[in-house]
Image (cartoon, grey):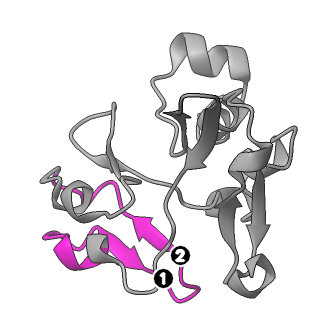
């Protein structure tokens, strides 16, 4: 299964992955309308690490684990792993207990800004499985790859 991998050596912290993630999951699919009229949360977050000599940035999103703790912790059955290996969330079934947020070892499941539900990366499955963050990263800091390709 292909996953999004972050390569921090290429990341400038521009945040375009967040912008395009929000836009891809918006109703309008328009950047301006998404930011001005829609309350969309990005499923990817750019993090910053400060060291004495430099700043390092990296993108954080769901790793679609082979044995996902979030799925096991979900009391409503909203969080599940589909037949392709993608960890998905049925927003309508989510009760907002936040158990999945607490157990995610990567901090990739977030409390959503919309209602009392959670938000996480879905690999843009509804738009053909070609993640918007990967398509729009100007420095190839995000790549859709098989685990074998990374090694």
Q: Is residue 18 left or right of residue 131?
A: left
How far from the left and from the top, in percent, is residue 85? 54, 84
Magenta stretch: residue 146 in it?
no
How far from the left and from the top, in percent, is residue 143? 78, 60
Q: Which residue is mark 2?
A: 86
Q: Give the image quarter of residue 103.
A: bottom left
How far from the left and from the top, in percent, is residue 114? 33, 33
Residue situated in front as seen by the camera: 53 or 43: 53
Q: Is residue 85 left or right of residue 76?
A: right
With respect to residue 114, does 90 lie above or below? below
Magenta stretch: residue 89 in it?
yes
- Whether residues under marks 2 and 1 lie with C-beta atoms below 8 angstroms apart, the answer is yes
How far from the left and from the top, in percent, is residue 22? 59, 34
With respect to residue 148, does 7 lie above or below? above
Query: What residue is shown at x 64% (from left), y 29% (from top)?
Result: 54
Residue situated in front as seen by the camera: 13 or 73: 13
Quadrant containing the N terminus is: bottom right
Query: What residue is shown at x 39% (from left), y 59% (from top)?
Result: 106
Q: Give the image quarter of residue 12.
A: top right
With respect to residue 34, does 61 lie above or below? below
With respect to residue 39, does 128 lie above or below? below
Q: Give the image quarter of residue 116.
A: top left
Principal secondary structure, stretch drawn in magenta: loop
Q: Secondary structure at mark 2?
A: loop
Q: CA distance from mark 2 to mark 1?
A: 6 Å
Residue situated in front as seen by the camera: 121 or 146: 146
Quadrant containing the C terminus is: bottom right
Q: Which residue is mark 1?
A: 82
Neighbor class of circle 1 (other Cα within 10 Å; few <14, some 14-19, many 20+) is few
Q: Which residues are magenta?
A: 71-95
């Amino acid at each position: 299964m292909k996953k999004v991998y972050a390569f921090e050596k290429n990341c400038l912290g521009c945040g375009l992955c967040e912008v395009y993630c929000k836009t891809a999951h918006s109703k309008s699919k328009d950047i301006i309308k998404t930011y001005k009229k829609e309350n969309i949360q990005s499923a990817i977050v750019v993090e910053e690490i400060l060291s004495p000599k430099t700043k390092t940035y990296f993108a954080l999103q769901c790793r679609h684990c082979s044995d996902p703790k979030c799925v096991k912790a979900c009391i409503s059955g909203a969080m599940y792993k589909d037949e392709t290996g993608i960890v998905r969330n049925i927003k309508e079934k989510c009760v907002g207990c936040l158990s999945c947020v607490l157990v995610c070892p990567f901090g990739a499941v977030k409390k959503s800004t919309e209602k009392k539900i959670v938000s996480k990366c879905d690999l843009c499955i509804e738009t053909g499985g070609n993640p918007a963050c990967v398509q729009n990263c100007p420095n190839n800091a995000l790549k859709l790859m098989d685990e074998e390709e990374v090694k």
